[in-house]
Amino acid sequence: MKKVLVLLLCGIWAVYAYANDGVFYTQGNQLIPISETDISVKKEVLTLNRVDDKIQVTVYYEFFNPADQKEVLVGFEAAAPDTYFNEQSVRLFPQHPYMSNFKVVLNGEPLSYEVAHVSRYDEKWNYLSNPEYYEDGKIKSAIPKELFLEEWLAQGDDGPVGHPLYVYHFKAMFRPGLNVIQHTYDFDISYERNGFTSEFYYILTAANRWANHQIDDFTLYVNMADHTSFHISPGFYKSADEWEIQGTGKYTIGTLPYQVRQDSIFFHIQHGNIRFHKENFHPDGELLITFDYPWGLWNIVDPDYIESFNAESFIDSRKLQYEPFTMNYRSERRAIYNDLFALEQRRILRNLPFAYRGYVFKTKELQDFYESTVWYIPDAEYKAKIEDLPEEEQKWVEYWSLSDSIDNVKKKEIEDRVNSMYKHVFSEYLKSRNPPLGYNFDTQYFSKDFFHLHDLISSLENQSGEPIIHDADHWIWGQDWCDDLSARVLKVDMVSGKKAKVTVNIHNCNDRQLTLVMVYERQNWFIDDMIDNTSMRQGIIENLESYKKEGIVPRIK
């Protein structure tokens, strides 16, 4: 009976997940990869399913054995997840700590397996990329001393690097003709690589070492869950046309600047999966899938970085891919978010779960934003109901809806402030046919910066003897006023937590609408700009610059 060693190699690291199906033949104490001279791969169906924080791997093989029945030793390598893994770690985790549900079924019969623990170092602590552990027809475990990396620890960062191996192994009997192997396992997704991406790496080229040097019929299914964006790097495929989206989705080419090739296909799957199929498949590259981690970028809102945080850029980055909804919901952060994001920006964030499902928005601003993304696919039949969302997404929507409640409180506060200002100002005007004396309403109600600009332009007006900006009274928007002088706030729009735009109706014989830009400073709200058809602030700045070019500058103490 001929004996062959078949190795299904899989390495799961702290950052990456590697899988490798290959064929090896033993010669002495060396493992030397060569082609299997008899057995060929007729069919392989590789299915990758992402479920929560795990990738479920299912591989279906059809092998053809043209010779007599033979016993095959099958092995599966999994690298330890931590360089510090040692003897004690092996005692605590006799099987790989981040891999579970390891099963192999041959021709309908489940196979039992054993686990060996193999050192990656020789007696002189030299690192071995392919350690020798197959001796006398058996897979040999390392002795405890070999697993204890005391030399590595002593040398610190300058010492050897690498991981011990878990080797799952079992014997299988290949009968003449067709043989079916079903191999399944799960592994945990790790969260590293600069906090942004994770990778799944599967070696396809090992299939070329079988007798037929190919897979006669190869199919790959990739299901990274609904509302997910992920890259697949070039290598074994030539173009995007070789992929089929089964469900609803679209793709772009290399739109993220992370550690992925810029010519990668970037899939955006609203619902379903993707499929790659090829006959007479002779892979000349490997499978690399890159996708984001579920905690997103919310920890970016850190007190040390708030000053440099750009909310507009952050919102625009949501256009590039589906983003997960996990975030830090601590109550003290809500005030930070309300200060950083404008109301319309928070509405965009709040409605992301519905946009992911294709909801067609009635609000033009929202619809325009989502149509500008690479992932949005409208579905006129979808009805948005918060109770139909997963719990985490319901929490997300409710959280940002509470932000609107906070804005409503601020809006009422600003409305009362503006109404109070105008009531005070107009009551003084109505007491006399002349502008009120002894009052400087600008000092009381303008922001520090806006008042300073008024001071500068007033100085130039005094110097020139002509009005530059103030050809009419900016409080009543006229040169005279009627007995029915009044003001009423029509609308308050929050720009950010400390800035708002207020539409005011000024009634001075006739109605006239004015926009006030309000800013929060000195524990209250102050006017930072008055806008009729044009911005008073901008007009002042342009005139100051124009006079400066002529050598005329304000003279103020």
Image (cartoon, helix red, strand yellow):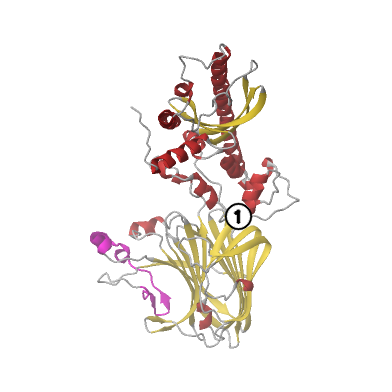
Nearer to us in this view, 226 or 66: 226
Q: Is residue 240 visible?
A: yes
x%, y% of residue 6? Answer: 49, 78
Nearer to us in this view, 203 or 169: 203
- Give me the residue at 23% from left, 60% from top: 154
Q: Amino acid at mark 1?
A: Thr
Residue that badge 1 annotates? 373
Can residue 554 be found in the magenta stretch?
A: no
Q: Is residue 491 visible?
A: no
Nearer to us in this view, 221 or 446: 446
Q: How many marks?
A: 1
Q: Residue furthest top?
A: 431
Can residue 131 be found in the magenta stretch?
A: yes
Say whether residue 174 is left or right of residue 523: right
Q: Quadrant of the C terminus?
A: top left
Few, some or many C-alpha atoms within 10 Å of disc 1 (few <14, some 14-19, many ≥20)?
some
- Give me the residue at 56% from left, 20% from top: 422
Say whether residue 290 is left or right of residue 449: right
* Vertical comparison of 534 with 141: above or below: above
x%, y% of residue 195? Answer: 44, 53
Nearer to us in this view, 425 or 33: 425
Quadrant position of residue 120: bottom left
Q: Residue furthest right?
A: 381
Determine the secondary structure under disc 1. loop
- Give me the residue at 56% from left, 11% from top: 431
* Vertical comparison of 51 with 340: above or below: below
Quadrant position of residue 242: bottom right
Magenta-colored span: 129-158
